[in-house]
Amino acid sequence: MWPESRSRRKVLQADKQKRVGRNGTYLKWLLICMAVFMISIFAHECGHGFANALAGIPCSTGFNRVGDIYKYPKDVDFREYYSNAEPILLDFGVPCTLILSVVGTILYLKSKKEKIRNFGAALAIGNSLLRLIPCSFVLFTPLLTGRVHIEDEYETGQLLVGMTGNDLFLYIPAFVSWILTAACLAVIIRMARKRKTEHAAAYFTVSVLAMCVGFAIAMVLDNYVRINWQPF
Ligand SMILES: [Zn+2]
């Protein structure tokens, strides 16, 4: 009996070690996804700021909202000037996120190095969800409730309708972002299955969690970390 119980203890110990090791890997993955996500949303906002500066509109950007130069979201007059500025079609915010999403997908598919592949997956998942979720609201809220949901792509659609007089353009930018980001996620999931990645569903869930936590932190940081954009 003794040798048997000893070997069983060894098996249980090995199981426990494996579980602890896996939890550590999940935590590492959560932190990587959070860091990549927060850098990505900062880059997205910088895209808005750069486009505004090129168009001659002074503004400030951080982790969530674009507003008046030298002001913070907590200020009551945060968007006093910006909300009255002439809307511009030029925007690098959404294109920046879409490019990061595609680049991440390509890195995940093509790279031979595991670390770069993992970074690619984090980049692709974070940036894809960053446009897929808001664009789902833009496309499906009117169908379900009859009300519009305003996001970057909807505003671009409004400008295109104003320029062309064709109502069809209203939802085209949101549709393009939705299709592109859904395709990136589908490709990542398919490849993970093909490579027989262990616990892929758990890693994906952790990525979504990282996005939620990252977004909550970003909302707070938005009040403290900002770039002021003077017109070029
Ligand atoms: Zn934006």
Image (cartoon, rainbow, N blue to C red):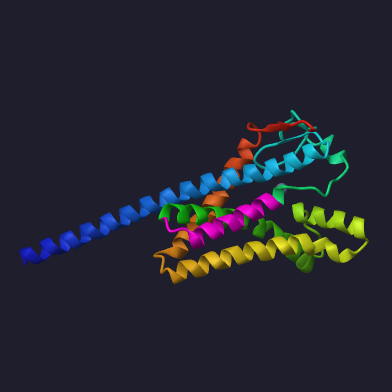
The main secondary structure of the magenta stretch is: helix
Pick the quarter of the image with the N terminus.
bottom left
- Picture quadrant of residue 38: top right
The image quarter in which residue 59 lies: top right
Q: Which residue lies furthest to the right in this view?
A: 165
**Number of marks present in the image shown:** 0
Residue displayed at 55% across by 60% down: 105
Q: Where is residue 137 in the image (x, y as percent from the top left)?
A: 72, 60
Q: Is residue 214 above or below residue 175?
A: above
Residue at screen point 71% across, 41% down: 65
Q: Residue furthest top?
A: 70
- Residue 1 lies left or right of residue 223; in this view the side is left
Q: x, y percentage for residue 162?
A: 91, 56
Residue 77 sits in which quadrant?
top right
Q: Is residue 139 left or right of residue 28?
A: right
In the depicted structure, whether residue 180 falls above or below residue 225:
below
In the image, residue 56 above or below residue 9: above
Residue 101 painted magenta: yes
- With 157 as the anchor, is 183 left or right in this view? left
Q: Is residue 35 left or right of residue 66?
A: left
The image position of residue 35, as x and y in percent, is: 52, 44
Asked if one can make out residue 193 in the rendered structure from this viewpoint, the answer is yes
Residue 175 percent coordinates (x, y)? 74, 64
Which residue is drawn at the image coordinates 51% and 67% (left, top)? 189
User: Quick one: 212 or 52, which is closer to the camera?
Assistant: 52
The stretch of residues the image draws in magenta is 95-113
Residue 151 in view (yes/no) = no
Instruction: Tell me the quarter of the image containing the C terminus.
Output: top right
